[in-house]
Amino acid sequence: MATIKIKQVRSAIKRPARQKATLQALGFRRLNQVIEKEATPQILGMIKKVEHMVEVVG
């Protein structure tokens, strides 16, 4: 499958625990970190849940 790059652009401070857990499950550890993931339906669903805190890069 295709890969996508995701960047965390907003902090998880004062966010619900489920959103924090989703960011952690995606692999984010710090702000402005870019990670590369396979574009599976599961990953795309996780991105949709926290789309206000991340952006897809390239």
Image (cartoon, helix red, strand yellow):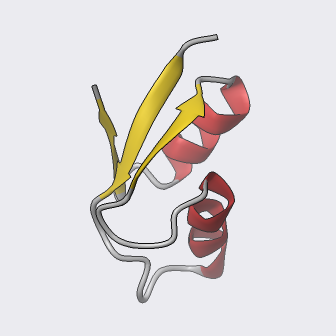
x, y percent for residue 51: 40, 49
Q: Residue at x 52, y 44 (%)?
A: 47
Q: Residue at x 58, y 74 (%)?
A: 20
Q: On screen, 57 above or below 31?
A: above
Quadrant occupied by the C terminus: top left
- Choose top left, top right, bottom left or bottom right for residue 24: bottom right
- Choose top left, top right, bottom left or bottom right for residue 25: bottom right
Q: Nearer the viewer, residue 54 or 30?
A: 30
Q: Residue furthest top?
A: 1
Quadrant occupied by the N terminus: top right
Image-based side of 9 in relation to 24, left or right: left
x, y percent for residue 19: 57, 68
Image-based side of 15 in relation to 31, left or right: right
x, y percent for residue 14: 43, 89
x, y percent for residue 34: 38, 50
Q: Residue at x 68, y 24 (%)?
A: 40
Image-based side of 55 in relation to 42, left or right: left
Q: On screen, 41 above or below 15?
A: above
- Number of marks in picture: 0
- Choose top left, top right, bottom left or bottom right for residue 52: bottom left
